[in-house]
Image: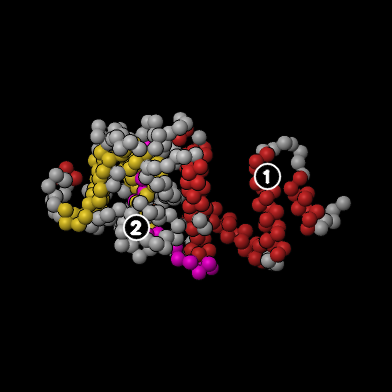
Amino acid sequence: MAEYTQQQLLDLVNTVQVAPGNARVRALTQRIVSDLFKTIDEMDVSADEFWSAVDWLSRLGASGQTGLITAGLGFDRLLDIRADEADQKAGRVGGTPRAIEGPLFVAGAPTAKAEVRVDEGEPKGEVFVMEGQVLDLAGQPVPHAMVDVWHANEQGGYSHFFPGMKPYELRRRIETDAQGQYRFRTALPPGYSIPPNSPTSELFEALGRHGHRPAHIHFLVVAPGKRTLTTQVNIPGDTYIDDDFAFATRDGLVVELERDVAPAGYESLGITQPFVRSRFNFVLQNAVTEDEALPLTRMERVKA
Ligand code: BEZ
Ligand code: FE
């Protein structure tokens, strides 16, 4: 028998099996394939449309831009919303809100104790210092926390992904001191935009959407016994602050900027002129499992 109706074909695809396989993968694949069969039928998808989508997916995979698409289609924020909902249900409230990691983290940035110049001594914009403490929910300092910071350069590019940048440029890890304090000097970053003439920009042009993110700085904050925090802060005043292509901006994560701060006390960061400062404390929840305190990013976590 090799003549099938659509439903017979779908049933076959969803049930054929010579070994147990992985039950979860089977269930998810069945659901997704069923939904796609339905979409193709109900929306009368032509063969050309189908193969053009397959071609786009192949080019997307080869470009390494899948993480831009997941963010732009809301999946990264969806996972954060679901994690927040799970926390609410479990009564785990308080602390700095989580915000999406994004696809541009690189592990292994150089480390420093208490303070560092993230801009590697080559200022390219307004001098900016961000400083504060890592605290627990009771307001007690968390010494020896590791604050991993990364952000875009003056052209919106991230090192490792953007041509011409040094390895780990604008990426550092800062270990908090005995009072849980950290501080770093950098240049106020601009926003990020998806690469033009790319599989990602093709989709967003076809959707009639822009691909801009407002200016932001990413953090991964890790400390023994504390729940690892992935978050990012936004710089106020950006055109896209309420229109982020990745839907990632959050209340409580827009920092305040103090302008014309006197340089006294900031000499060790090479500051001799008035500069822009922001004070921001990271508040960590206690970890309830060992796994929650691991210093892992999203991709390291799935490979661990
Ligand atoms: C970013 O954080 O820069 C970013 C996040 C999601 C997609 C693309 C970029
Ligand atoms: Fe970013």
Q: Quadrant of residue 3?
A: bottom right
> Mark 1 and 2 residues: CB-CB less than 8 Å, in contact?
no
The label on residue 84 is none
What residue is pinned by disc 2? 215
Judging from the image, what secondary structure is the residue with disc 1 in?
Answer: helix
Taking 112 as reference, is 153 above or below it?
below
Question: What residue type is disc 2 on?
Answer: Ala
Q: Is residue 104 visible?
A: yes
Residue 289: % across, % down: 47, 31
What residue is shown at x 66% (from left), y 48% (from top)? Answer: 29
Residue at point 68%, 53% (across, down):
33
Residue 209 in magenta stretch: yes
Instruction: Report helix, strand or loop for mark 2.
Output: loop
Give the quarter of the image for residue 223.
top left
Is residue 110 left or right of 33 when viewed as pictured? Answer: left
Along the viewing direction, whichever of 278 and 30 lies nearer the viewer: 278
Point out which mark residue 27 bears.
Answer: 1
From the viewer's perspective, tell me whether residue 284 is left or right of residue 60: left
Residue at 16%, 45% in the rendered image: 266
The x and y percentages for residue 287 are: 43, 33
Residue at the spot 69% in from the left edge and 48% down from the top edge? 30
Give whichever of 154, 36 is nearer the camera. Answer: 36
Question: Residue 91 vs residue 272: left or right?
Answer: right
Q: Amino acid at mark 1?
A: Ala
Question: Relative to 6, does residue 119 appear above or below in the rendering?
Answer: above
The figure's colour scheme reads secondary structure
Which comes sooner in the sequence, label 1 or label 2?
A: 1
Quarter location, residue 235: bottom left
Report if residue 58 lies within the magenta region. Answer: no
Part of the protein shown in magenta: 205-222
The residue sitting at the right extreme is 1
Mark 1 neighbour density, 10 Å: few (under 14) some (14–19) many (20 or more)? few
